[in-house]
Image (cartoon, helix red, strand yellow):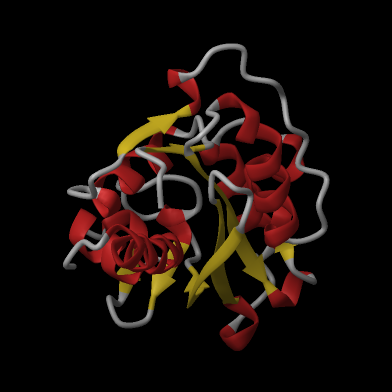
Amino acid sequence: MNGAALLFATTNEGKQREIRRLLEGLPLRLLFLQDVPEVPEVEETGQTFLDNARLKAQGYAHLAPGALIAAEDSGLVVPALEGEPGVYSARYGGLTDDVSRNALLIKRMQSLYGKDRDAYYEAVVVLLSPQGEEHIFTGRVHGSIAPAPDGTGGFGYDPVFIHPDLGRTFGNASQYEKDLLSHRGKAIRAMREYLEGQLGVEG
């Protein structure tokens, strides 16, 4: 592998913090979209998380010639709401902030009980080599939706997502617990393991 840099195509500060922690120590220069000029807008028009991750990886690849390119798409899925918010997690209801989106989800689920409150987080990471070879890494974590937001940690739907092993929301989880158990943590650790093998790094 001849790429000395990895451009991870996101501007989300919460995701960037997690990615930095999870990839710490790799002999690659880690870049995000704010580190490159003239970033185009790549519309997330896909029907799945994989579709959107692939669109972003391919759409931003020209920004860092010779580098590895990674893009991730993820979200929360509630089967009882026919998969909502799903690929629209970051723009659920056309709302622009986490607090409002969490409130909308709680309202949509106010008449649901028991197993109908089950949900899962899913993440898909697409990694492109400098030669354009594609590698896909996924992560999923199952839980349930709390009756009200609880906790100020994390971001997105973390204050309403209860992890069964923790017995509390991701909003009340430590950074270590979130990185270990989360959907994104699983997907990016899988990508890290692949990169360590390619770079000859001992994990």
Residue 184 spot, x, y in % from top left: 44, 60
Which of the 4 image quadrants contains residue 117? bottom right
Rendered position, 192 above or below 162: above
Tell me which residue sits at (29%, 41%) in the image. 28
Specify the quadrant that holds the C terminus: bottom left
**In the image: residue 118, left or right of residue 174:** right
Q: Which residue is drawn at 71% across and 76% down?
A: 79
The answer to which of 90 and 132 lies nearer the viewer is 132
The residue lying toward the viewer, choosing from 101 and 77, is: 77
Q: Residue at x 60, y 87 (%)?
A: 115
- The answer to whether residue 88 shows anywhere in this view is no
Q: In the rendered view, does 155 fall on the left or right side of 140?
A: left
Q: Is residue 28 visible?
A: yes
> Quick one: which residue is furthest to the bottom in this view?
115
Q: In the shown orientation, is residue 187 left or right of residue 97? A: left
* Image coords of residue 199 (percent x, y): 30, 57
Task: Report x, y in % for residue 157.
Answer: 50, 53
Residue placed at 61% from the left, 57% from the top? 133
Question: Which residue occupies the foreground of this view, 60 or 3?
Answer: 3
Instruction: Classify residue 22 as left or right of residue 69.
Output: left
- Does residue 9 sit above or below 39 in this rendering? below
Outermost residue on the top side: it is: 38
Residue 88 vertical placement versus 122 (above, below): above
How many labels sit on residues?
0
Task: Examine the image and state in which quarter residue 61 appears.
Answer: top right
Q: Where is residue 40 in the image (x, y as percent from the top left)?
A: 69, 21
